[in-house]
Image: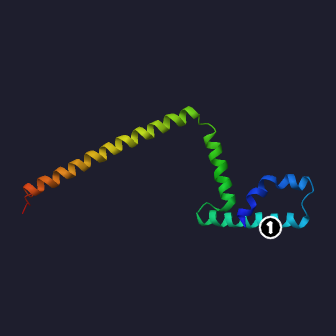
Amino acid sequence: MARGLLPMALVFWLEVGAERVSMGDIVAQVEALSELAGDLDARLASAGVGGLAGAVAIYERLRDVLAGVSIADLERMARQVADLDRELKEVDRRLAAVRELKTLLDRIEPPVRAT
């Protein structure tokens, strides 16, 4: 299966070039790669990516879009996201404190219902 392909993937072409591999071995390796590609294609398709072709198209689109983004821009955006995350956590903490205070006040004096 695919686990047996990992070491082979690193030396596949070297072995073919050195002619130390029989044609039967090459056919078996190509069949295993084909099976792996089919499995990967099916998994990507079921994930809504559109199979291998869709994944390649997404990769190429992202590469083109991100080619114009500098490392400095990415670092600046990452800092902004981290700052926003901290601010939102602080807002969440404050809202929890207000909810807790409201619960305590409701225990002391229940809210008056308008009739």
Quarter in which the C terminus is drawn? bottom left
| 110 sits left or right of 91 in the view | left
Q: Tell me if residue 101 comes above or below residue 83 in the rendering.
A: below
Quarter in which the N terminus is drawn? bottom right
Element under disc 1: helix
In terms of depth relative to the viewer, which is nearer, 58 or 2?
2
Amino acid type, residue under disc 1 in the picture: Glu
Residue 24, given in percent of the width and then of the height, sits at: 88, 67
Hey, which residue is sitting farthest right in the picture?
19
- 10 Å crowding of disc 1: few (<14), some (14-19), many (20+): few
Residue 68, given in percent of the width and then of the height, sits at: 62, 36
Q: In percent of the image, x 92 and y 53: which residue is there?
A: 18
| 6 sits left or right of 78 in the view | right
| 20 sits left or right of 47 in the view | right
Count of numbered circles in the view: 1
Residue annotated with mark 1: 31
In terms of depth relative to the viewer, which is nearer, 79 or 21?
21
Q: In percent of the image, x 30 and y 47: which residue is there?
A: 92
Residue 53, given in percent of the width and then of the height, sits at: 69, 58
| 46 sits left or right of 1 in the view | left
In terms of depth relative to the viewer, which is nearer, 1 or 75?
1
Q: In percent of the image, x 65 and y 43: which residue is there?
A: 64
Q: In percent of the image, x 66 and y 58: which residue is there?
A: 54
Q: Coloured how? A: rainbow
Residue 9, given in percent of the width and then of the height, sits at: 77, 56
